[in-house]
Amino acid sequence: MATYRVLNPTGDVVATKDIESAQDAHAWFVDQQADNSELGWRMEVEHDGEWSFFDDSEGSSS
């Protein structure tokens, strides 16, 4: 099991959850996006105390 978190386009963590598989994590990420038309949402996975990129909605906050 791994810990995942969702960040909104401004970089705020909006949800964190322990999830069994990467496929389930991706489905959870899609569900967590408040507005699916808004780009810049991203998901990170925790590994050894560090957060790493996992997925995004193909946008940026700049």
Image: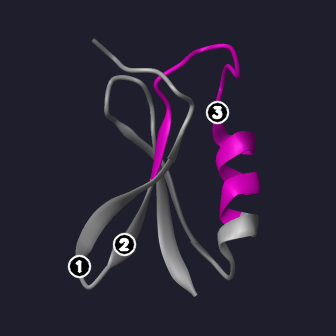
Residue 62 position within the rendered picture, expressed as x and y whole percent measured from the top left: 27, 11
Question: Front-most of 6 and 26?
Answer: 26
Amino acid bearing label 2: Glu
* Residue under pointer 3: 33
Q: Give the SS element for disc 1.
A: loop
Classify 10 Å Cα crowding around label 3: few (below 14), some (14-19), many (20 and above).
many
Q: Give the SS element for disc 2.
A: strand
Viewed as shown, does residue 19 lie left or right of 49? right
* Residue under pointer 2: 46
Can you say whether 38 is above or below 23 in the image?
Answer: above
Classify 10 Å Cα crowding around label 2: few (below 14), some (14-19), many (20 and above).
some
Residue 26 position within the rendered picture, expressed as x and y whole percent measured from the top left: 68, 56
Location of the N terminus by quadrant is: bottom right
Viewed as shown, does residue 8 lie left or right of 26? left
Amino acid bearing label 3: Gln
What is the number of the mark on residue 3?
none
Mark 3 touching mark 2, by CB under 8 A?
A: no
- Inter-mark Cα distance, 3 to 2: 19 Å
Residue 9 position within the rendered picture, expressed as x and y whole percent measured from the top left: 41, 24
Query: Reading the chain from its start, which is encountered first: label 3 or label 2?
Result: 3
Residue 51 position within the rendered picture, expressed as x and y whole percent measured from the top left: 29, 64
- Inter-mark Cα distance, 3 to 1: 25 Å
- Look at the image and give the residue range highlighted in magenta: 25-43
Query: Reading the chain from its start, which is encountered first: label 3 or label 1?
Result: 3
Can you say whether 49 is above or below 43 in the image?
Answer: below
What is the number of the mark on residue 49?
1
Q: Residue at x 52, y 27 (%)?
A: 58
Classify 10 Å Cα crowding around label 1: few (below 14), some (14-19), many (20 and above).
few
- Inter-mark Cα distance, 1 to 2: 6 Å
Mark 1 touching mark 2, by CB under 8 A?
A: yes
Query: Quarter-wise, where is residue 25 in the image?
Result: bottom right
Amino acid bearing label 1: Gly
